[in-house]
């Protein structure tokens, strides 16, 4: 059993193979020659200079990060010292509040 699609494909291929074609070829005697130079001028810094520059930038960046870490560590220690210094005062206030609460509850229960 033949399908219609197969029949159309055969017709298309038959028509395409019957078309004349002309292969693209160079002109007789070849293409004209042209001048070209491979001398590219050196512009900008050399590779070594770029590598050194980026290395210096990275070293500076690492230095800055280290300095920031030191500063942050010192601020954290200062904050912890301040909280530690305030702890007895805050504990005394909480103890006084709790004592007042206990006395008020006991006073109400006795009366």
Image (cartoon, grey):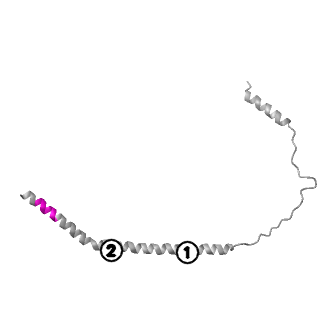
Residue visible at 66% across and 74% down in the picture? 48
Q: Main secondary structure of the magenta part?
A: helix
Residue visible at 53% across and 73% down in the picture? 61
Q: In the rendered view, does 111 fall on the left or right side of 38?
A: left
Q: Between marks 1 and 2, how big is the CA–CA gap? A: 33 Å
Q: Is residue 94 above or below residue 52?
A: above
Residue sitting at the far top? 1
Q: In the rendered view, does 65 fall on the left or right side of 35?
A: left
Occupied quadrant, residue 20: top right
Indicate the position of residue 55 as horizontal and vertical percent values: 59, 74
Q: In the rendered view, does 20 fall on the left or right side of 75?
A: right
Occupied quadrant, residue 9: top right
Indicate the position of residue 88 as horizontal and vertical percent values: 24, 72
Residue sitting at the far right? 29
Indicate the position of residue 58 as horizontal and vertical percent values: 56, 72
Residue visible at 89% across and 61% down in the picture? 33
Location of mark 1 (residue): 59
Q: Is residue 10 above or below residue 21?
A: above
Indicate the position of residue 15 as horizontal and vertical percent values: 82, 34
Q: Is residue 65 above or below residue 109?
A: below
- Of labels 1 and 2, earlier in sequence is 1
Looking at the rendering, the stretch of residues picked out in magenta corresponds to 99-106
């Amino acid at each position: 059993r033949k399908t219609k699609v197969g029949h159309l494909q055969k017709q298309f291929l038959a028509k395409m193979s019957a078309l004349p074609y002309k292969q693209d070829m160079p002109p007789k005697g070849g293409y004209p020659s042209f001048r070209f130079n491979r001398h590219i001028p050196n512009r900008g810094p050399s590779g070594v200079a770029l590598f050194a520059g980026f290395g210096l930038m990275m070293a500076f960046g690492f230095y800055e990060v280290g300095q920031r870490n030191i500063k942050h560590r010192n601020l954290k220690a200062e904050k912890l010292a301040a909280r530690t210094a305030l702890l007895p005062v805050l504990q005394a206030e909480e103890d006084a509040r709790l004592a007042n609460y206990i006395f008020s509850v006991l006073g109400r229960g006795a009366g």
